[in-house]
Each structure stands twice: as structure tokens, then as C-alpha cells.
Image (cartoon, coloured by chain):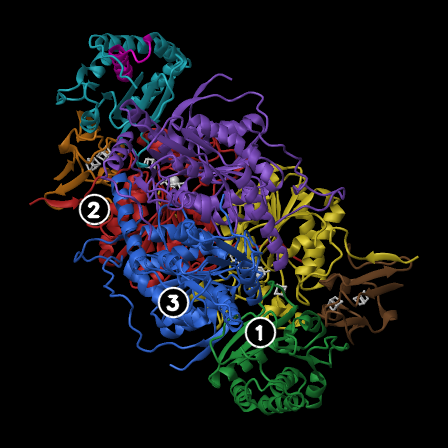
Chain colours: A blue, B purple, C red, D yellow, E orange, F brown, G cyan, H green
Amino acid sequence: MAKKLMKGSEAIGEAAVQAGCHLFFGYPITPQNEIPEYMSMRLPQVGGTFVQAESEVAASNMLYGAAGSGERVMTSSSSPGVSLMAEAISYLAGAELPVVIVNIMRAGPGLGGILPSQGDYFQATKGMAHGDFRLLVLAPWSVQEAADLVQDAFDLADYYRNPVLVLGDGLIGQMMEPVEFREGRLPIKPLEAKTWAATGNDGSKPRSVINSLFLDPEALERHNVHLKEKYDRMVRDEVRFQSYGLDRDYDVLIVAYGTVARVCSTAIDELAASGVHVGMVRPVTLFPFPYQAVREAAARASSVLVVELSTGQMIEDVRLALANSKPIHFLNRMGGMLVSPDAVVDKIRAMADGRSTEVVHA
Amino acid sequence: MAKKLMKGSEAIGEAAVQAGCHLFFGYPITPQNEIPEYMSMRLPQVGGTFVQAESEVAASNMLYGAAGSGERVMTSSSSPGVSLMAEAISYLAGAELPVVIVNIMRAGPGLGGILPSQGDYFQATKGMAHGDFRLLVLAPWSVQEAADLVQDAFDLADYYRNPVLVLGDGLIGQMMEPVEFREGRLPIKPLEAKTWAATGNDGSKPRSVINSLFLDPEALERHNVHLKEKYDRMVRDEVRFQSYGLDRDYDVLIVAYGTVARVCSTAIDELAASGVHVGMVRPVTLFPFPYQAVREAAARASSVLVVELSTGQMIEDVRLALANSKPIHFLNRMGGMLVSPDAVVDKIRAMADGRSTEVVHA
Amino acid sequence: MPETVFSRPEALRDVTTHYCPGCTHGTIHRLIAEVIDELGVRERTVGVAPVGCSVLAYNYFETDFHEASHGRAPAVATGIKRARPDLVVFSYQGDGDLASIGMAEIIHCANRGEKVTVVFVNNAIYGMTGGQMAPTTMPGQVATTCPLGRDVDHAGHPIRIAELLSTLRTPAFVARASVHTPLLAVNAKEMLRRAFSLQIEGRCFSLVEVLSTCPTNWGIPPAEATRWLEKTMLPYYPLGVFKTPESGSREPRPLDRGVR
Amino acid sequence: MPETVFSRPEALRDVTTHYCPGCTHGTIHRLIAEVIDELGVRERTVGVAPVGCSVLAYNYFETDFHEASHGRAPAVATGIKRARPDLVVFSYQGDGDLASIGMAEIIHCANRGEKVTVVFVNNAIYGMTGGQMAPTTMPGQVATTCPLGRDVDHAGHPIRIAELLSTLRTPAFVARASVHTPLLAVNAKEMLRRAFSLQIEGRCFSLVEVLSTCPTNWGIPPAEATRWLEKTMLPYYPLGVFKTPESGSREPRPLDRGVR
Amino acid sequence: MPQIVISPDRCKGCELCVQACPQQILGMGRRINSKGYFFAEVVEPPRCIGCRLCCIACPDVAIEMRVHGTMYHYFAY
Amino acid sequence: MPQIVISPDRCKGCELCVQACPQQILGMGRRINSKGYFFAEVVEPPRCIGCRLCCIACPDVAIEMRVHGTMYHYFAY
Amino acid sequence: MQNDVIMAGFGGQGILLIGKMLAYAGMREGKEVSWLPSYGPEMRGGTANCTVVISDRPVGSPVIRSPRAVVAMNLPSLDKFEPDVRPGGLLLYNSSLIDRRPARQDVTVIEVPANEIANSLGNPRGANMVALGAYLGATEAVSIDGVVEVVRETFAAKPGVIEVNITALRRGHEIGAAHTVGAGEA
Amino acid sequence: MQNDVIMAGFGGQGILLIGKMLAYAGMREGKEVSWLPSYGPEMRGGTANCTVVISDRPVGSPVIRSPRAVVAMNLPSLDKFEPDVRPGGLLLYNSSLIDRRPARQDVTVIEVPANEIANSLGNPRGANMVALGAYLGATEAVSIDGVVEVVRETFAAKPGVIEVNITALRRGHEIGAAHTVGAGEA
Ligand SMILES: Cc1ncc(C[n+]2csc(CCOP(=O)(O)OP(=O)(O)O)c2C)c(N)n1
Ligand SMILES: Cc1ncc(C[n+]2csc(CCOP(=O)(O)OP(=O)(O)O)c2C)c(N)n1
Ligand code: SF4
Ligand code: SF4
Ligand code: SF4
Ligand code: SF4
Ligand code: SF4
Ligand code: SF4
Ligand SMILES: [Mg+2]
Ligand SMILES: [Mg+2]
């Protein structure tokens, strides 16, 4: 198909529709209102259903019901709304339901503001809710990638029977860029019929019960082991990242994700023009995190710079990857303020001439 | 006061009352129903108020209103209920309200089961909700310590104007042990009058607005920086841990928290009886985590064993502390199954004779 | 040859429930199962279990099931029905589940007119968690979180779900029944049949509130519990049909009109 | 000396609001502030702001304030009032906030009989987020999430909060007013005065629903918006007092009684 | 002739059937079943009028009814 | 004599006062204020009857009223 | 020195209560104690059990996988806990409701016809007290006099049942004392 | 080669629209483009702006702190963005609504009486098109013919306004072309 100039939010919606998403349940929240708005217009055109839920709590539980019926379903929200989905997301993971959840992050905590942020990294990758579970987390850096990852997300969700979170920020949601949807796209994973779905039972197969309750602790432990094995498979098979400028020698390695990585790419280009070579590893999956890629790329650098729109969350994963093997520096903005290419350039210069000090952990 | 044999849940309630908690808002959930039940009986006796909220969402927002009025307030719940409080907890942190929240963890994910678990470690210490914030997290290992930490929690909450989370498990909630409440207990921190509280304004001070909204990103960034500084102060001043058996030489260092650490202490005693010396560092604050204590104690050991009732969450903090300096082994149970002293003994033996393999990260 | 004129319906699995002796959750289960059998929709019925004593309902019905999170069964049912309008979807919820934590979900599900059936079991208490006060607990009734009895000045009056929902403008079938005597149970089954039938015909949302006993947490034996229900609950929770898809809007009019 | 017979009330801060031209949020703010002034309670009043266009209400009232999370203002107000019964507590909430996400909180706050006052601003739309459908959006009304107009078969009929709440058994004052003409605004102020007075007397929960315009998201100029409100909303949302603490229970009776 | 069959293992001894029977022919036995409950028994089978009120009242579907020959019911069920 | 004072900077040009005035003596001016709005003006001050409907209708408290001497109101406010 | 015991039976047999009394008496003797109930699946009508630890030093694990003693008041409890008793430990079982003999050879087995004794004392609900007495008799984990005190306090509101319960306790104690077993070393 | 521009004005001035048209035309010429609106505080009646990047290679940062060009349609926008223009860059301002001259000496300043021109063309809502035309004229960021095409498509549903808008665009172009400025090197 030809390229279309689309808002990130709309591209996400269209990508879902083209991936066969038939139901969307959502509740408005800036900066992603265009996703439900797009779906309310688009889904009826393809025989699908859009329901404006009464809240994010309800939306996420509608998702649970619809996913348990075997349909491809999605919801989207922004930070505070995602927090309200926490309990249901734990249920979705516990009941192993394939759903796609989009979080277009805004700044917090609390009501915070509506401008871009990456303050939900920990929530997305580690402590989203009670209980031991993981989401597969995909972080696009452009509108095109957002569309691509949303489509992949549906396949991954179905394959692993696990919720997949697409983690963008206000920039991804709001900006327009050219997008192309591949025609005749095939699933990226071999997918089986959803025989586990609860769609009525005529006795030809065992009853389907969509459930996360295991009153017997031994059974629940087995379930936990089963889930852990699944997460381990994701760690083994689903790590995605992008290297930038690793084809040359570099002194500093940047680790950044999402639109921040784009800003860094501009800075890297500018520095290259002035003869300073910097490399970058951009995690595309935040869980599973590309520990090995970061470790290997860092091995060639003398120091590492982590850039985030938060007080420092992904930096913990970078520290886990590096285990003190390289000094780590940190550049961040918060509250909706953005990191500019200039700030990255300055920071790299400061690292070079000793004005920047390494982050040391307590 | 004389020792009383009390259920952990009741001791938590009584400790709160004695710390001057005047209001409790909660919603029933096993295994901590005895906390609201106790409060419904006890608070009216001291002129306080118990409100059974319609949900955990409501309870946590009632907490917000009451805390913003300057009163000492508490809620308690168990894992799924805490997930429903996520949004409000982010608001509480953003608006810097001092509250005490008790989570008596049960096994997950989803509805899971009601038996003890430590599956909410990540949620408590890292990703509780959207936005960049931290809770001070206290993890008792006995009923007496639960009572003590609840009292401290009120002081810490007031001092830092931050929510404090007391993280127990079903054992803490359900078991009875002797408890003693110190008479004439003084606050552990110098506390100031809550002039920031919104209690009506006669013009004698600036208006009080309890709020986490900052539409101006520069203002929100300043707020984030302010919060980060607060968390850094906690990291500097509030780390608590307990050492066990570090007064002798040891080959293995155990890191465990909560009731699991108690189980480990029995195992350590049993091993000591057979001439094998094992040390333990028990984090009492999970945030801030005692990185340094773990690092220093591990330096004297040849390997480290982390024991948890989860797929492995605190182990990430131990890895951050150790940065590959020592091999880490892991012992866990899940789903409500408990680690027994025998299992710990076996694991230590297995580490000694090479049957246990180090945990290696992706 | 003797003919069996009363036995376990097909839609009810042949297992012993975990319910306490005399708990009428069991009776209500059976009535639902009988209706499902009689309407011949067992193979396309999907139930939604709540969090409450009936959390294990999925073990008792011979149909596919979803276990919902506490209070959200109407949202889960919405998701199922919107995904698969050909299915017959019912939720089974207690009074803590539906009338407390799940209040928003039930009102909006009813108001959207989702074509699902809700069976609302009102036993005036939180059974599963050990007898805490429910929104439906009677004034003066003792519960573990109102040890001196529900004080209406502090906790308000019991909520009447059938009445509340019947005021919504969207067409619906709303009724209240009880099973504490066999004859009333027969009537309850009739209400359930109408509720399921209206769903199957694609007509409207339907909800049947069923008064139920909780001998364990009321702290009285089953037979006495039926008498307590009769004496205490029945006057406050009148039985009958409150709304039919034909009966239109029943909301109160203003006591006095505003200036125009 | 000229006497000033109309000017900004003391309880309303002397700042320009962020509301769009002609948005009646401003009018409602002023009426509340006038009532607070006239009752002489400004110094002990605490407001609770919602998430919605009135999210910045705390900048406009000269009283202490709490900013609540979306829909939970009644719970926040409960917390404040229970902590400090001597304060006069009011929440100010939009229809998305109160009637959608906050449905459970408003019903339970009213049902517990919290001695707080809720000002419920019904503008039939989500203003702040850019015009999505609200539970109060009129049938056929276009909104960004119902681009072809609200379809009652899909989204149900608009919810009437005053009617819904007036059916609860717990004593309360519940009224609906409008401010789209000056005379109705005067009446709205009278309703607000009664609502605050009943709280101050410790009598009961009180809620005033106020119909409001959203010229921006309705996509019509302010003067036309008042006419649209009059023509479209008023017939469906009648004005008046629906419940007073004296008027007792107003819930519907069953259409037909169950077998006894 | 209606015939009432009470399953000793399904019965939880709640006595609701005893209360329901208009003929007062049901009673609690003195034996304990595998779950620890005393279970209900038919005291005078011949007096049963086949009204099925006991069956309907039993929350545990512990009572079945069989009939030989035609019979009338109080109500359609 | 009632005197209407419209604050040009507070006025957002919504015209609600214009619609409210029974004397039809309010109108929109041709000047733009600092926020970019055309603001309301009193066209014929002497015809004002002091009913305050304009003040009540204004969502932005942009209209004040002063009076010289006693006056009657349509309603208590 | 540590005594630990798992007491188990039907929900209505008063198992949790005698466990609490034991722990309470231990505390009053200045011992370190813990009492831990099974709070298993949120279900009705199952079996109940509790673990009591009484020790001279701070109680380590309140969960005991291999207890020094088990008191089984019904068959399911015996089935469940018989295998867990620590070798050399103690197994008391309520022979009134359990019609099989325990199979373990490596533990001291004490047969306590608790319901029969209670019935014979005209105190049918006192079987739990008989069992507690028997446990005390066999282990002397705490002194019977201390427990008698606790009984008086516990039933202060129903003075009518105090003496019958004390009698039941003492009758159990006699049975247990016939098999005295020393406490383990911690 | 990269062109980037921040366009800013009152909410109702059609700023976001001309930004989109620019980006769209760029895309159709095979360039890489991004369009980013300010979606600031959820408030009404403020100012609006958007950033458009048109480049030969994948767009790096869609956020431009120091744009190569600024189009300021009202005074608050000029106040806000004048300092940010990259030295040597371009500053177009709507002199119809802005009564001060920009102070910057190190950038090319182009005065565009956008509203006056639009009014004079009988198309009072066309000031944005005049400004867009002026920007195109000065930078040739994309070809005016491409934009004309986009105008035709955009207003396809209201054919009546197409030609007046194209005229406004061309009039702006003439003004801008008088000051042609090359695009920067990325
Ligand atoms: C989010 C959440 N909150 C609380 C609970 C605990 N909980 C389980 S069941 C229940 C209430 C049960 O009462 P009801 O709905 O009346 O059902 P019943 O047991 O009386 O049939 C509660 C509060 C939970 N599981 N999840
Ligand atoms: C949890 C959460 N969900 C959604 C939002 C986004 N949001 C902000 S205001 C609003 C609705 C506003 O509508 P209404 O309450 O009717 O107020 P109005 O703006 O119309 O006055 C929504 C959905 C949010 N801030 N938080
Ligand atoms: S606790 Fe109450 S509701 Fe639950 S099964 Fe027992 S009697 Fe029934
Ligand atoms: S968007 Fe609507 S409700 Fe919000 S300020 Fe503007 S007119 Fe008022
Ligand atoms: S069928 Fe009727 S008469 Fe016969 S036993 Fe049952 S209740 Fe009694
Ligand atoms: S009603 Fe059923 S369970 Fe109850 S006693 Fe009779 S047969 Fe037994
Ligand atoms: S006071 Fe009355 S007459 Fe005078 S300008 Fe205002 S509305 Fe018109
Ligand atoms: S009502 Fe107020 S804001 Fe509107 S035009 Fe009149 S003076 Fe201006
Ligand atoms: Mg109940
Ligand atoms: Mg609204």
C-alpha cells in the first residue's frame, strides 16, 4: 500500500484493524484520545465493535471477556489509566489471555501532566501489578514502527497467550509521519486455533474455563512455574533491539529507547559530523531487555550514557547488563520536558572532558 | 505494657491506633480481613472512624482526602486489592501525602490463591503505578516487628510526606505471637505541624491545595526533581536491615526478607549445629534496599543464596548490589507453597557440594 | 418403569459444592441450570463467575466459564457478548461483588443494554471473606465490620439493586425473587426463565436479584435463616418484577419543578 | 456614592479562568462562590476538584482544595469529611467524572449519607479530552467516539443522575438545575444554597446536578448552545428537586408481586 | 406412587427439606456421612404425596424423585 | 441609575450577556482584547433597567453593576 | 529447647482454640511462642489445623514441616499429618472418630478416645480439651496449671463450662502422662 | 538536507493545517517528514504550534529546539519562538496581528501581512495559506506545485474555497520568494 501521513495514534488503530483486531474497549485520556476515536469510526466499517467503557477498570475487564472468547482485542490508555488496569492485567496474565495494550505515557506521578514521559518503564517491565507475571513490552520510536509493532504484538500475544504492552509516549501518539501497511502480511509466529477459548461447549472438547484462581497451592505453584517458563522463552526468543553507529569505533555507547533514542540519533549524527563517534543500542523490547546486546556493545566503549525521560528506571537494567564493567552516565528530563539533541551532544562532550560524573549506586 | 498474644493483623491494627491513626478506610480481602475488622471495633473506642469503603479504589481515595486533611490514616489490603489502589497511590506520592498502606501479600497473578507469597516485591519497590515515585517499603518478619514497623511507618510517612508501605505476607497476617507495645513511645523523626494540610483557610497562611497536577512541564520537572531528592534522602538515611550470623566466618550468605528470612534463620541454626556456618542479611527496608550491607556481607562469603516466595524479584536488587562479584544461587517456592528450613538446609548443602548451579542472567 | 421426575439438571455438574449446609447458593445454581436445560442453550452458554462464595461456580455448571475479577463480571460479560453475540452469557454475582465494588460496572452494563443476564445473589453479607458488612446488610444486622450492628447514620441504608436499576431509561428486565421457600423458588425460576429468554431473543439486558441465606455468617442454622430472611429482608426487599422491556422509564419525577 | 450591587464574590479568586468563551462552568463557579460567601463559611470550606475541564477549579475558588483522581472526588470528600466533620466539603464534578468512571463512588457516597455537597456539572460531553461521548450524551448527539451520533442500541440511553440517586433510601437532597438563562441560574443558586445549608446543619448528603453548555465540543457558538440545551437536554433532564431529607424513599414498587 | 431418593453423600444435613415437607415425613438420621454430616431420611415413604417441595428446597440436589404411574403436580416446574 | 461596567480583559466575547439583556442594549464591540477576543459593550447605557440579567449570565464575571439610589430587583439574588 | 505441634481436625472441633490456649500458656510461662492457623482456601466445611511453637529462644520458622508432635482429631487429619511427624516424635489421635491405627512405628503413638471421654463427662464439646490435656501430659510443653489458668480466663464469660473443661483437660492429661515424651532440643 | 520549521499562532488560525499540508506535500515528493503538534495542557483558547521536519534521510528528532525557520502568526508566538530560531535561519511573522518588529539580527526576517492579504483576497480565513506560501517561497522546502495539489485534495469537499486558497498561497509565495533562503545541511 502507498504511504499515508498518519498520526501515531491513528496508525496504531489502523495497524490493529489490519492485524484483525475486531474489538476495542477504551476510555478517553490525553494524549491518546485519537486511538479510541479512530477505532469508533473505523471498527464498524470492518464489522468490528468499539465500546467506550465507563472506566479503564471496566475497559480492561471487557478486554478479558472478549479475549477469553478468542477474538483479537485491544485497549489503549495513558499512564493513570494504565494504573487502573493493573488488577485486570494481572488477571489477563494469570489466565494467559492474548491482548494488546497500548500505553502512550505522560508525565506523573498522579495526575501529573500530559506531555511525554518515560516514567512508566518500571511499571511496564517489572511491577505492573500483584503477583509474578511479565508482559512482553514493545517500544516504538517512530509512527511506522508503532504500526509494525502493534501488528507484531497481536501475533506475539496469541503465540505466547500473554498480554503484550506497546509502550509509546506522547510524541508517538501525537506526531504524524508517513506510514505504510504491508499488504498480505503474514503472522510472525506459527499460530494455532484458540481451542482454549470459552465459546460454548457441545461436549466435543473439554470445557473451557478462563481462570487465574488456583486454590490448591501446589497447582498454583505449577501454574507459576509454567508461566515462568513462558517468560524464559520470551527472554530467549523475543529480544529485539536496534544498533546505531556500531559499525565504527566509538568511545561512548548510548542506551535509550523510544522517541528519546531518535533524539539521540540526531545527536549522534551531529557529533559524527564533528568527528566524534558515538554508538547506540536501542532496546525495542523492554521486556525481554537486550542485556546481552548492551553488554557486548558496551564492551567496545569506554563508557555508557543512558538517556531517559524519568528519574532513571531503564538504567537499572543497563546496570544489570553491565555489572560495573563500565562507567555509566545519565542524562534525563522529566515532567514532560524533552531531551534535545543539543543536550545529548553537550553531555557526550562533558563525558569526554570529565565534566560529567559517573552514576554510582548506593 | 505487658505482652499480649495477638494475631499479626490485629497487632498491626493496634499499633496503628497507638501511633495515633484516627481513620481507617478499607475493603475486606483475605488474608487480612482481621485488620479492618479490628479497626471497626477499636477505632470508635478511641474516637476514631472506620469506614468500609465500596472498593479498594474508593478506600485509597478516601485515604487521600483524609491524609490531605492532616490526619494519620491507614488502609490495608492484599495483593489484588493493592493493584486497585495503584492510581491513587501514585496520586498520594505525587501530592506528597503521608499515609500508611499495608499489603499482606497472597499468591498471584490474578485471583491466584490466598496463601503467602512475595510476588509483589517489584510492585512495592519499583513499578507500583505510573509516574516516577517511590514508596518507603518496610518488611516485618514477626508480629512484634510488624507492630513496631507500623508505628515507625506513621512517623516516616509524616516526616517524608510520602506513602509508606508495610509489606507482609499471609503468615504475618494470620499468625499469633506475643506483642508488646512500648508506652510513651516517641516519634522516630522530628515532626512538624502539618501546615500544608487543607483544613480551611482564614487567610493566615497561603491556601492549601492538595494536588499532583502540574500543567507546566517545567514546574512538573521541578516537582519530579524535588521528589527524587526526597527519595535520595531516604536512600541515604532510612536503609534498615538485620544481620544474622555475621559474627562468625561463613561461606554462604543468605539474603531473604520477611517470614522467609525467619525460615532461613532456623535453617542457619540447624546448619550451625552441624558445624556449617551461614550468614544472612535480612533487608527490613525493601526500598531503600540495603545494597551496601549486602555487598559488604557478600564480600566475606564465597557465594550468595537468595530465597524468595516468587519467581525471583528481590534477586535483581541483590544482583545490582553484587555486580557479578559473587555467584548467586536461588531458592524459591511459589503459589502459596512455603520454603521450609529443610529446603534451605538442602540448598546450602547442594551449593557446598556443587549440586546447585549459579543463576546466570540473560 | 419408574419415571424420574426430579433430578439433577444436565447443566449442573455432578459434584458436591463447597457451599455450607443450607446455603441457598446451591438452590440458585440448580434453578439456573434447569432453565438453561429447558431453553436448550447449554452448548452455547458461557457463565461468568464472581469473586465471592460462588467463585467456584465454574466447577458446578456444565458450561464454559470465565472467572472475573471482583465486581467486574458485568464488564467481562460485556466483552464476551460483544465478541460473540451468538452466545448466551450470564454472570452470577454476590452483593459485595455487584452492589459494592462492582456498582459502576453493573449500572453501565445495564444502561448500555448489554444483552446478558445477571443473577444477583443478595445474602446481605460478605460470605466468602467471613461475614463483613455488605451494602445490602440490614440496619442493625451484626457483621464483622459492624460489630454493633449496621448503623445507618454511619453506613447508610441497604441498597436495593432491583429498584436502582429499574430506574434506568434503557429497556431491561429487572426482577427480585427469593428461594427461601420452595414455592418462591419456583417463582424465582420463572423470573430466571424470562431473563434468559429475553436475552436469547436479543431483546434486552436482564437481571434477577435473588434473596439468599448465609447461615454460616449470619450465625444461625439454615431453617432459622430462612425465617430471618422472611422476617427481616423481605419487607425491605419486596419481590416481583420491577421493569420489563415494555414498561418503559420508571424514574421519579421532580418533587417540585424548577423555574422555567 | 454608587453602590456595587453585582460583583465578583469573595470566594471566587480574581483570575481569568481557562474556560472557553460562553462555557457555563464559569457561571456555576460563581454561583457556588456566592453561596459560600452568603453562608459565611468560606474559611472552613474545602473543595474537591475533579479531572475534567474544571480540573483547575482549585485555582478559581478562594478556599482550600483537593485535586482528586478522575471520578473519585466523592471518596476524597468522604475522607476529608470523616477526618474533619467541622469542615464544609464540596466536590465539583463533570459528567464523565461522576456519571461514568465515578459511578460507584457517587452512589456509595450518597448512600452512606456523607455530609458533603456535590455539584454535578452535566454538559453531555467529555469537555476536557476533546468531545468524547459521555453517559449523559443525548441520543443522536455526535461526539468524537460516536461520530455518527449516540446510538442507543449500542451505547444505551443517557443516564439521569438526579433520578438515579433520588431512589436511594438514605436521606438526601437531590436536585437538578440549569444556568442557561439568568432566571434559571438564580434558581440554581437557590438549590445550591439548600444543598450547602443541609450539609452545614449536618442533615444529609446533597447533590445538585447543573446542566451546562460546552460550546467548543458541541461545535456551536455559546448563545446557540443555550438553545440546544433548552431544546434537547431539558426535556430529558427535567429541572426541580427530586429528593429532600424529608421526602423519604422514592424507589419504584414492583410491577407485579412475586408469589408469596 | 412417588419415591423419594436421598443421597447420603450429597446431603449436608441442613434440614431444609425437613422444613419444606408438607407431610412432615422427612427427618434427620443418626448416621454420619463421609463429610461428617448427619443426613436426611424419609421416615414414612408411603405418605409422600410427590409434591417435590423437598427436592426444590434442597440446595445440594441430594433428593431425587421417581414416580410410578401418572401424577398431578401442584405447579408446573 | 444602574451602571454596567464590563471589563474588556475579562470578557471572552461569548455574547451571552447580549442575549440576556431584556433591553437589548448590549452588543459586541469591534476592538480585540489582549486575549484576542472581541468584547461586549453597553450600547445605550441610559436604557439599562438594572435587572442584572447580564451580570448573572456572564460566565466570566466580566460585568459589574453599580447603582446610585434605591432600586427594585426582579428577584432576590 | 523447643516444642512444636500441629493440631488438626474438623472446623467445628475447637482445634484453633486449644492451639491458642497452649500458645497463651506458653507465653505466660515466659516462653517464646507462635501460633499459626491454616487459613487455606476461602472455603467452608473443610478441616482446620494450627501449628504451635513453644521455645526457649526466639521462634525461627513458625511453619513446621516435620513437627515434634501431631494431634489428629479426625481421620483426614491423621491421613494428612501422620507422615510428617518427626521420627521419634509424638502422634496423638482421637480414637473416638478415627477407626484405624496409625501405621508409623518410629513415633510414640497415643490413642485418645477424646469424644468418648468428653461425652462421659457430660461435656460433648470438650473433646478438644481432652486432646490438649493429653498433649500436655505427654510433653509437659507447658504446665497444666498454667493451662488451667488460661481455661478460666478464656471461659470467664461462661463460668458454667469452666470446671467441666478443666476436668476434661485433666482426664486427657492422665492419658498423656502415661506416655511422657521429652521435648526436642532446638 | 533538512528543512524544519515551527509554525505557531492562535488556536483558530489554521496553523496545524498548514503544517500538515507542508508535511504531506513533502511526503509526496518522496522526502522523509514528520509533523508534531503542541498538544500542551488540556486547555482551551491558548496558542497552537506544530513542528514540521522535511528531510532527505530518516527524520531524527521530531522535536526541534532550534528550528531553521519559524512562522509566527500572532504576538505570543513571536515572543515565544523568536529566540529559538537557529542563527542564520528564517523568521516569518504575521505583521497584520503583530505590531512589533522582531529584534533578532542574525536571522532573515520576513514580514508577511497575512491577514491583510487574505482580507484583500476576500478570503479572511486564508491568512494561514498566505503564511505557508511565504514560507515556501523563502525556502523551497517543497515545491509550490506539490502544495497546490495538496490544497486541491484537502478542500475537495468544498470546491468553492480551493481557488481562493491557492491564490492566497501564491501571493504568500511571491513575498517569500523575494527573500529566498537555502535549506540547511542535516
Ligand atoms: C479486588 C478484591 N477485593 C477484595 C477481594 C476479597 N473478596 C473476596 S469475596 C468478597 C466478597 C464476597 O461477598 P459477596 O459478593 O456478597 O459474595 P458471597 O460470598 O456473599 O456470596 C471479597 C471482598 C478480592 N478477592 N478482590
Ligand atoms: C484515570 C483517568 N482516565 C481518564 C482521564 C482523562 N480525562 C480527563 S478529563 C476526562 C473527562 C472529562 O469529562 P467531564 O467529566 O464530563 O468534564 P468536562 O470536561 O466535560 O467538564 C477524562 C476522560 C484521566 N485524567 N484519568
Ligand atoms: S459462607 Fe454463607 S454464602 Fe458462603 S457458602 Fe457459606 S452459607 Fe453460603
Ligand atoms: S471544552 Fe467545553 S466544558 Fe471545557 S471549557 Fe470549553 S466549553 Fe467548557
Ligand atoms: S415430595 Fe413432598 S411429600 Fe414427598 S417427601 Fe418431598 S416434600 Fe414430603
Ligand atoms: S435439604 Fe438436602 S442437604 Fe439439606 S438435609 Fe435435606 S437432603 Fe440433606
Ligand atoms: S442590567 Fe439588565 S438592562 Fe441593564 S444591561 Fe444588564 S441585562 Fe441589560
Ligand atoms: S457574557 Fe461576559 S464574557 Fe460573554 S460577552 Fe458578555 S461580558 Fe463578555
Ligand atoms: Mg453476599
Ligand atoms: Mg462533561
Q: Which numbered dot is residue A149?
A: 3
Quarter occupied by residue F65: bottom right
Q: Which of the pair D200/B276 is nearer the observer?
A: B276
* Residue G95 locus on image (x, y percent): 17, 18
* Residue C133 locus on image (x, y percent): 44, 36
Between the residue at mark 2 and the residue at mark 1, the CA separation in whole angstroms equals: 64 Å
Circle 2 is placed at which residue position? Answer: C13
Q: Chain of mark 2?
A: C
Is residue G131 highlighted in magenta? Answer: yes
In the orientation shown, which residue stands out farthest toward the left?
C1
Q: Secondary structure at mark 3?
A: helix
* Residue A44 locus on image (x, y percent): 40, 72
Could you tell me which quadrant the N terminus of chain C lies in? Answer: top left
Is ligand 2 closer than 8 angstroms to the Cβ of mark 3? no
Is residue B147 highlighted in magenta? Answer: no
Between the residue at mark 3 and the residue at mark 2, the CA separation in whole angstroms equals: 44 Å
Q: Which numbered dot is residue H51?
A: 1
Residue F74 in the figure: left or right of residue H79: right
Query: Which is more foreground, mark 2 or mark 1?
Result: 1
Q: Which of the pair D8/C224 is nearer the observer?
A: D8
Could you tell me which quadrant the C terminus of chain C lies in? Answer: bottom right
**Magenta segment, which residues?**
G122-144
Q: Chain of mark 1?
A: H
Q: Answer yes or no: do the residues labelled 2 and 1 have beta carbons within 8 Å?
A: no
Relative to A327, residue H124 above or below? below
* Residue A207 locus on image (x, y percent): 22, 53
Residue under disc 2 on the same chain as residue under disc 1: no
Query: Which is more foreground, mark 3 or mark 2?
Result: 3
Is ligand 2 closer than 8 angstroms to the Cβ of mark 1? no
Identify which residue is drawn at 14% across, 22% down.
G104
Q: Amino acid at mark 3?
A: Leu
Q: Is residue B32 visible?
A: no
